[in-house]
Image (tube, rainbow, N blue to C red):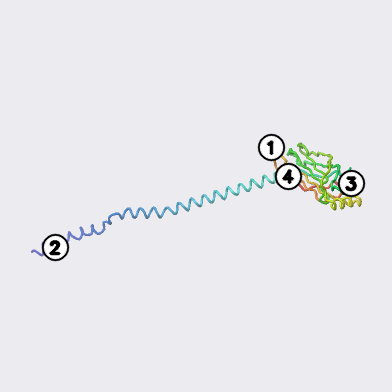
Amino acid sequence: MEEGKSKPALAKNPSGSLRRVLRPPHGLHSSIDHLDKGRYLPCCCFACCAWSCLIMFLLIIAILFLGITYLAFLKSGMPKVNVRAFNITKLQVDDGSQKMNAVIGLGLIFSNKNDKLKLLYGPLDVDVTSEDVLLGKKKLGGFYQNPLNDTQLDMTMTLENADVDKYAAEDLISDIKAYEMVFDLYVGGHIGFQVGKLQMNNVPFLASCNQIKREDVDFGRKPECEVKLFAAR
C-alpha cells in the first residue's frame, strides 16, 4: 500500500520539473531583443546609403545636363570676328636707342548671327603683333548688338618710344618691304547675352587671329578670328 501511495506523488513531480526546465534563464528575453535589433540595423543603414547614393547620382547628372545646356546656349550666341582692314601709317625704329614709333589702322567686323540673342560687350582690349614686335594696343568701350547685326569698328593705334628688339624689328621691316608681312590679332574682354528680360553678363571670351597675311586683308578677303569662351591670352 505504501508503494501505491508514492506513485501519484511521482506523477505530479515531472510536470512541475518540466515547467522549471522550459522557463528561460534570467535575462534571456533581453538578449533576444538585442539580437533582433542588431539584425535590422545593418539593413536600415544599407537602405539609407543606397538612397543617398542615388540622390547624389541624380543631382550630378542634373548639374552636368544644365552645364552642357548652358555652354551650348552661350556657344550659339558667340559672335564672328573678321579683320576688314589693316594698314601701317608710320613705322620708325631708332637703332641707337632700340625704340620704335608706329601708327597703324585696324578695321574689325563683329557679326551677331543669332536671331534671338542681343549681345552685350564690355570694354575690349585689342593687341596687334608681328614677328614678336608689338605694333599697337587699344582699349575699346563697351557696346551692344541686336540680333542679326553687323558692327564695324575702326581704330587707330599709336606707339611712341616703345622698346623693341633690334633684330625682330629688322625682320619685320624686311617682311613689309617684300609684301610678306603677317600679323597676329587678339581681342579679349567680356561678353553678355540678353533674351527678353533674361540677361547674362561678364562671360570672358577671346578672339584670336593668328598668322594673318596682310596681302589677304589688302585684297578684301576678311580673315576670320577664332572665338573662344572662358579664354584669356
> Which badge, 4 or 2, comes first in the chain's sequence?
2
The residue carrying mark 3 is: 218
Of mark 1 and mark 3, the one earlier in the sequence is: 1
Task: Estimate the spatial distance between the alpha carbons at disc 4 and disc 1, rounded to whole Å.
Answer: 17 Å
Q: Amino acid at mark 3?
A: Asp
| Most foreground residue, 125 or 91 | 91
> Which quarter shows the N terminus?
bottom left
Q: CA distance from mark 3 to mark 2?
A: 133 Å
Left or right: residue 1 versus residue 204 is left
Q: Position of residue 226 (x, y in %)?
A: 77, 48
- Residue 62 left/right relative to 126: left
Amino acid type at circle 4 is Phe
Q: Residue 75: where, in percent of width, then height?
A: 72, 45
Tell me the tag on residue 7: 2
Which amino acid, by three-letter code, is at mark 1? Gln
Q: Element at badge 1?
A: strand
